[in-house]
Image (spheres, helix red, strand yellow):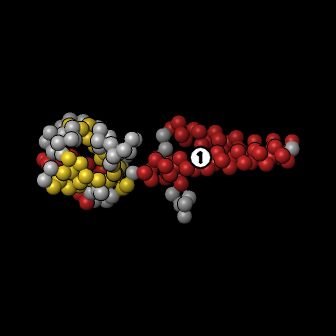
Amino acid sequence: MMFANLGTRFQSLPRWRKAVVVVYFGLLPFACYEALVNDAYKFIVSMAGMFSLVAVVVGSFYRENDLIRHVDVPFSMLNVNQNTLHVGEHDFNIHDIKKLVLESVEEKAYLSLPYNPLSVGVTAQFSFPVKDLYAVKSWLELRLPHVKILGLPAD
């Protein structure tokens, strides 16, 4: 189950990460063969290192995509109530929000508030279908006219 959509995730990786994966798995058989032929101890140490690298490489497939919650209906994550913007389970005073990011990458659109972090390096963000991008933009402009929306070309 964990590897069910590995091909799709590989296609969504940046080019440099694809190159790392290809080079790594291209060199893996040679490293295993060399260690096996030369010495059993070297083989054990090499395999431990290889399994560690496999864990890092496979983990990188899931790290980027799984941190951002995806919803099919973006308005289920957004609500303005008095002076509070609710983004999922996070609340923000609308007067504290000066900028937010709304962008699209392939089939997904993303909304994030990087200038209003929840904690160091953690921001409220989610992804949704790209077809709803401009509806979300209009919704935000209507309810938060003072907020600058970054990431999209101006209309």
Q: Residue drawn at (17%, 53%), measured in percent from left and top?
A: 80
Q: Is residue 22 left or right of residue 111?
A: right
From the top left corner, tell me how far across and down residue 41 is, in percent.
Answer: 84, 46
Q: Residue drawn at (46%, 47%), measured in percent from left and top?
A: 64
Position of the N terminus by quadrant: bottom right
Q: Is residue 95 left or right of residue 130?
A: left
> What residue sits right under mark 1 in the picture?
56
Numbered circles on residues, count = 1
Residue 149 seen in this snapshot:
no
**Residue located farthest toward the front when viewing the structure as drawn:** 119
Mark 1: amino acid: Val
From the top left corner, tell me how far across and down residue 74 is, in percent.
Answer: 27, 56
From the top left corner, tell me how far across and down residue 71 is, in percent.
Answer: 33, 58
From the top left corner, tell me how far across and down residue 72 is, in percent.
Answer: 31, 59
Q: Residue drawn at (75%, 44%), measured in percent from left and top?
A: 46
Q: Is residue 71 left or right of residue 136?
A: right
Viewer-nearest residue: 153 or 118: 118
How crowded is the residue under tag 1: few (<14 C-alpha within 10 Å), some, or many (20+)?
A: few
Position of the C terminus by quadrant: top left
Residue 38 seen in this snapshot:
yes
Badge 1 marks a residue whose secondary structure is: helix
Viewer-nearest residue: 7 or 70: 70
Q: Residue drawn at (79%, 48%), measured in percent from left and top?
A: 44
